Amino acid sequence: MNKDWLINQLPAVMAKDPFLNRFTGIFQEIATGLRVEANAVPDYIDVGIAPHDFVRWIGSWTGLPVQIDFGDEATARKRVREMVASSALLYRRRGTSDGLAGLISVVTGEEAMVSDTGGIFRAGDKPPSERRITVEIQSTGGLDAPLLVSLIKDELPVNCTFELVVAGVPVQHDESSVGLSRDPKA
């Protein structure tokens, strides 16, 4: 970008005036800063290249668990970017077994299998009295099991119970506490 790009756009007669040159220079300096920032907008829109703190900040708007301590910084960066990139899809599926499986997969880095007792019932038919969901994964992906349990509880309807099975072993948790905060510090 030419150093005097705005001043050079003045009519020749005005460009010779030292006061107008300095006065226009003020606006040129401000506008140059704005142009530089505007040129960087595509870098902020793409979660693959946006600064990590910005991606985490945007992710916090979605309510996704972007503040979780994933152990090491490289894993945190990768998973937070994946969560934010998939947030629209996750929210379209929220409240479904696919949505829960997607969230668990992106948080743990492991494929999750979710099964439930729900379904479609004819008018007048009564659904099962206990709505139970089973979540199966091979590993917690480095997350503490209680934190993962809390995330699952936050995604389930109030009247559901669930079982978390990690590598074939059921994880024990208190069925009575529902809707824990996603904030691991809470």
Image: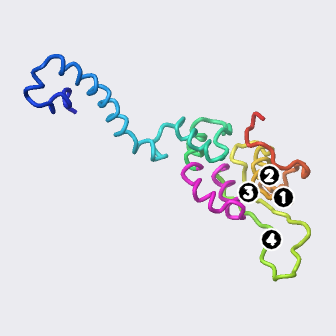
Residue found 81% across the figure and 63% down from its top: 133
Q: Which mark is residue 153?
A: 2
Range of residues picked out in magenta: 83-108
Q: Callout 1, which amino acid? A: Phe
The answer to which of marks 2 and 3 sits earlier in the sequence is 3
The answer to which of marks 4 and 1 sits earlier in the sequence is 4
Whole-percent x, y for residue 56 in the image: 58, 39
Q: CA distance from mark 2 to mark 3?
A: 16 Å
Residue 103 magenta-highlighted? yes
Residue 69 image-quadrant placement: top right
Q: Callout 3: helix, strand or loop?
A: strand
Q: CA distance from mark 4 to mark 2?
A: 17 Å
Q: Is residue 120 left or right of residue 79?
A: right
Q: Residues within 10 Å of mark 3 (few under 14, many from 20)?
A: many
Q: Callout 4, which amino acid? A: Gly
Q: Callout 4: helix, strand or loop?
A: loop
Residue found 52% across the figure and 37% down from its top: 54
The answer to which of marks 2 and 1 sits earlier in the sequence is 2
Residue found 88% across the figure and 50% down from its top: 172
Residues at circles 2 and 1 in contact by the CB criterion of under 8 Å: yes
Residues at circles 2 and 3 in contact by the CB criterion of under 8 Å: no
| Residue furthest left as drawn | 13
Q: Is residue 67 left or right of residue 185?
A: left
Q: Nearer the viewer, mark 2 or mark 3?
A: 2
Whole-percent x, y for residue 148 in the image: 76, 47
Q: Callout 2, which amino acid? A: Lys
Residues at circles 4 and 2 in contact by the CB criterion of under 8 Å: no
Q: CA distance from mark 4 to mark 1?
A: 12 Å
The answer to which of marks 3 and 1 sits earlier in the sequence is 3
Disc 4 marks which residue?
Answer: 118
Q: Is residue 126 left or right of residue 151?
A: right
